[in-house]
């Protein structure tokens, strides 16, 4: 094996903790599931605008908690890098948190400015939320894959 630079600390995934955080996140899933039908249809959204405003604010708070738990317990700096490819994925996924949060914070603020009589304005906002939702779901799925890969790696590599 190649001699690696022992001073290079890389990010690793604390698979069991990260899995616990995801398994336990009923509140987050409940909010996302309530927003989904409201954000899919123009008329439904307009009819429930105050509810959508409240749910986006809740989603913002819940995601702040979710990301901070993941960052506090789900990832760690690893001095010995057993699996470089997992470290690259871990760095990439953790680094998505600030942008995802910035996007949902922006949406929770912008929803207050939308003129619900303006179809184009509403549609533009709903499309922006849909894009965020897709990015967030893709992020969550990639983290779950990372958890499974890290658990496999733990089981598969004896040292
Ligand atoms: Fe995450």
Image (cartoon, rainbow, N blue to C red):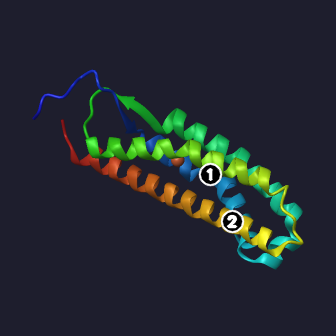
* Residue sticking out furthest to the left: 1
Number of numbered markers: 2
Mark seen at residue 25: 1
Q: Residue at x 62, y 51 (%)?
A: 25
Mark seen at residue 33: 2
Judge whether 33 appears above or below 86 on screen: below
The verdict on label 2 being within 8 Å of ligand 1 is no
Residue nearer the viewer, 127 or 20: 127
Picture coordinates of residue 124, whole percent (x, y)? 72, 68
Q: Residue at x 34, y 41 (%)?
A: 87
Q: Quadrant of residue 159?
A: top left
Mark seen at residue 126: none
Q: Tell me: 159 left or right of 99.
A: left
Q: Quadrant of residue 119?
A: bottom right
Picture coordinates of residue 54, whole percent (x, y)? 83, 55
Q: In 3D space, how far apart are the residues under numbered discs 2 and 1 (Cα atoms)? A: 12 Å
């Amino acid at each position: 094996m190649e001699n690696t630079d022992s001073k290079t600390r890389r990010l690793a995934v604390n698979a069991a903790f990260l899995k616990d955080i995801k398994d336990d996140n009923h509140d987050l899933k409940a909010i996302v599931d309530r927003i989904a039908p409201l954000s899919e249809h123009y008329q439904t959204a307009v009819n429930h605008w105050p509810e959508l405003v409240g749910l986006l604010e809740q989603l913002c708070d819940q995601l702040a908690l979710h990301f901070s738990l993941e960052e506090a317990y789900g990832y760690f700096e690893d001095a010995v890098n057993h699996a470089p490819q997992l470290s690259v994925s871990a760095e990439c996924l953790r680094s998505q948190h600030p942008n995802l949060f910035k996007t949902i914070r922006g949406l929770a603020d912008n929803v207050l400015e939308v003129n619900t009589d303006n179809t184009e304005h509403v549609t533009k906002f709903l499309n922006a939320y849909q894009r965020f939702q897709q990015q967030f779901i893709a992020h969550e799925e990639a983290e779950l894959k990372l958890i499974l890969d890290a658990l496999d790696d733990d089981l598969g590599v004896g040292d």
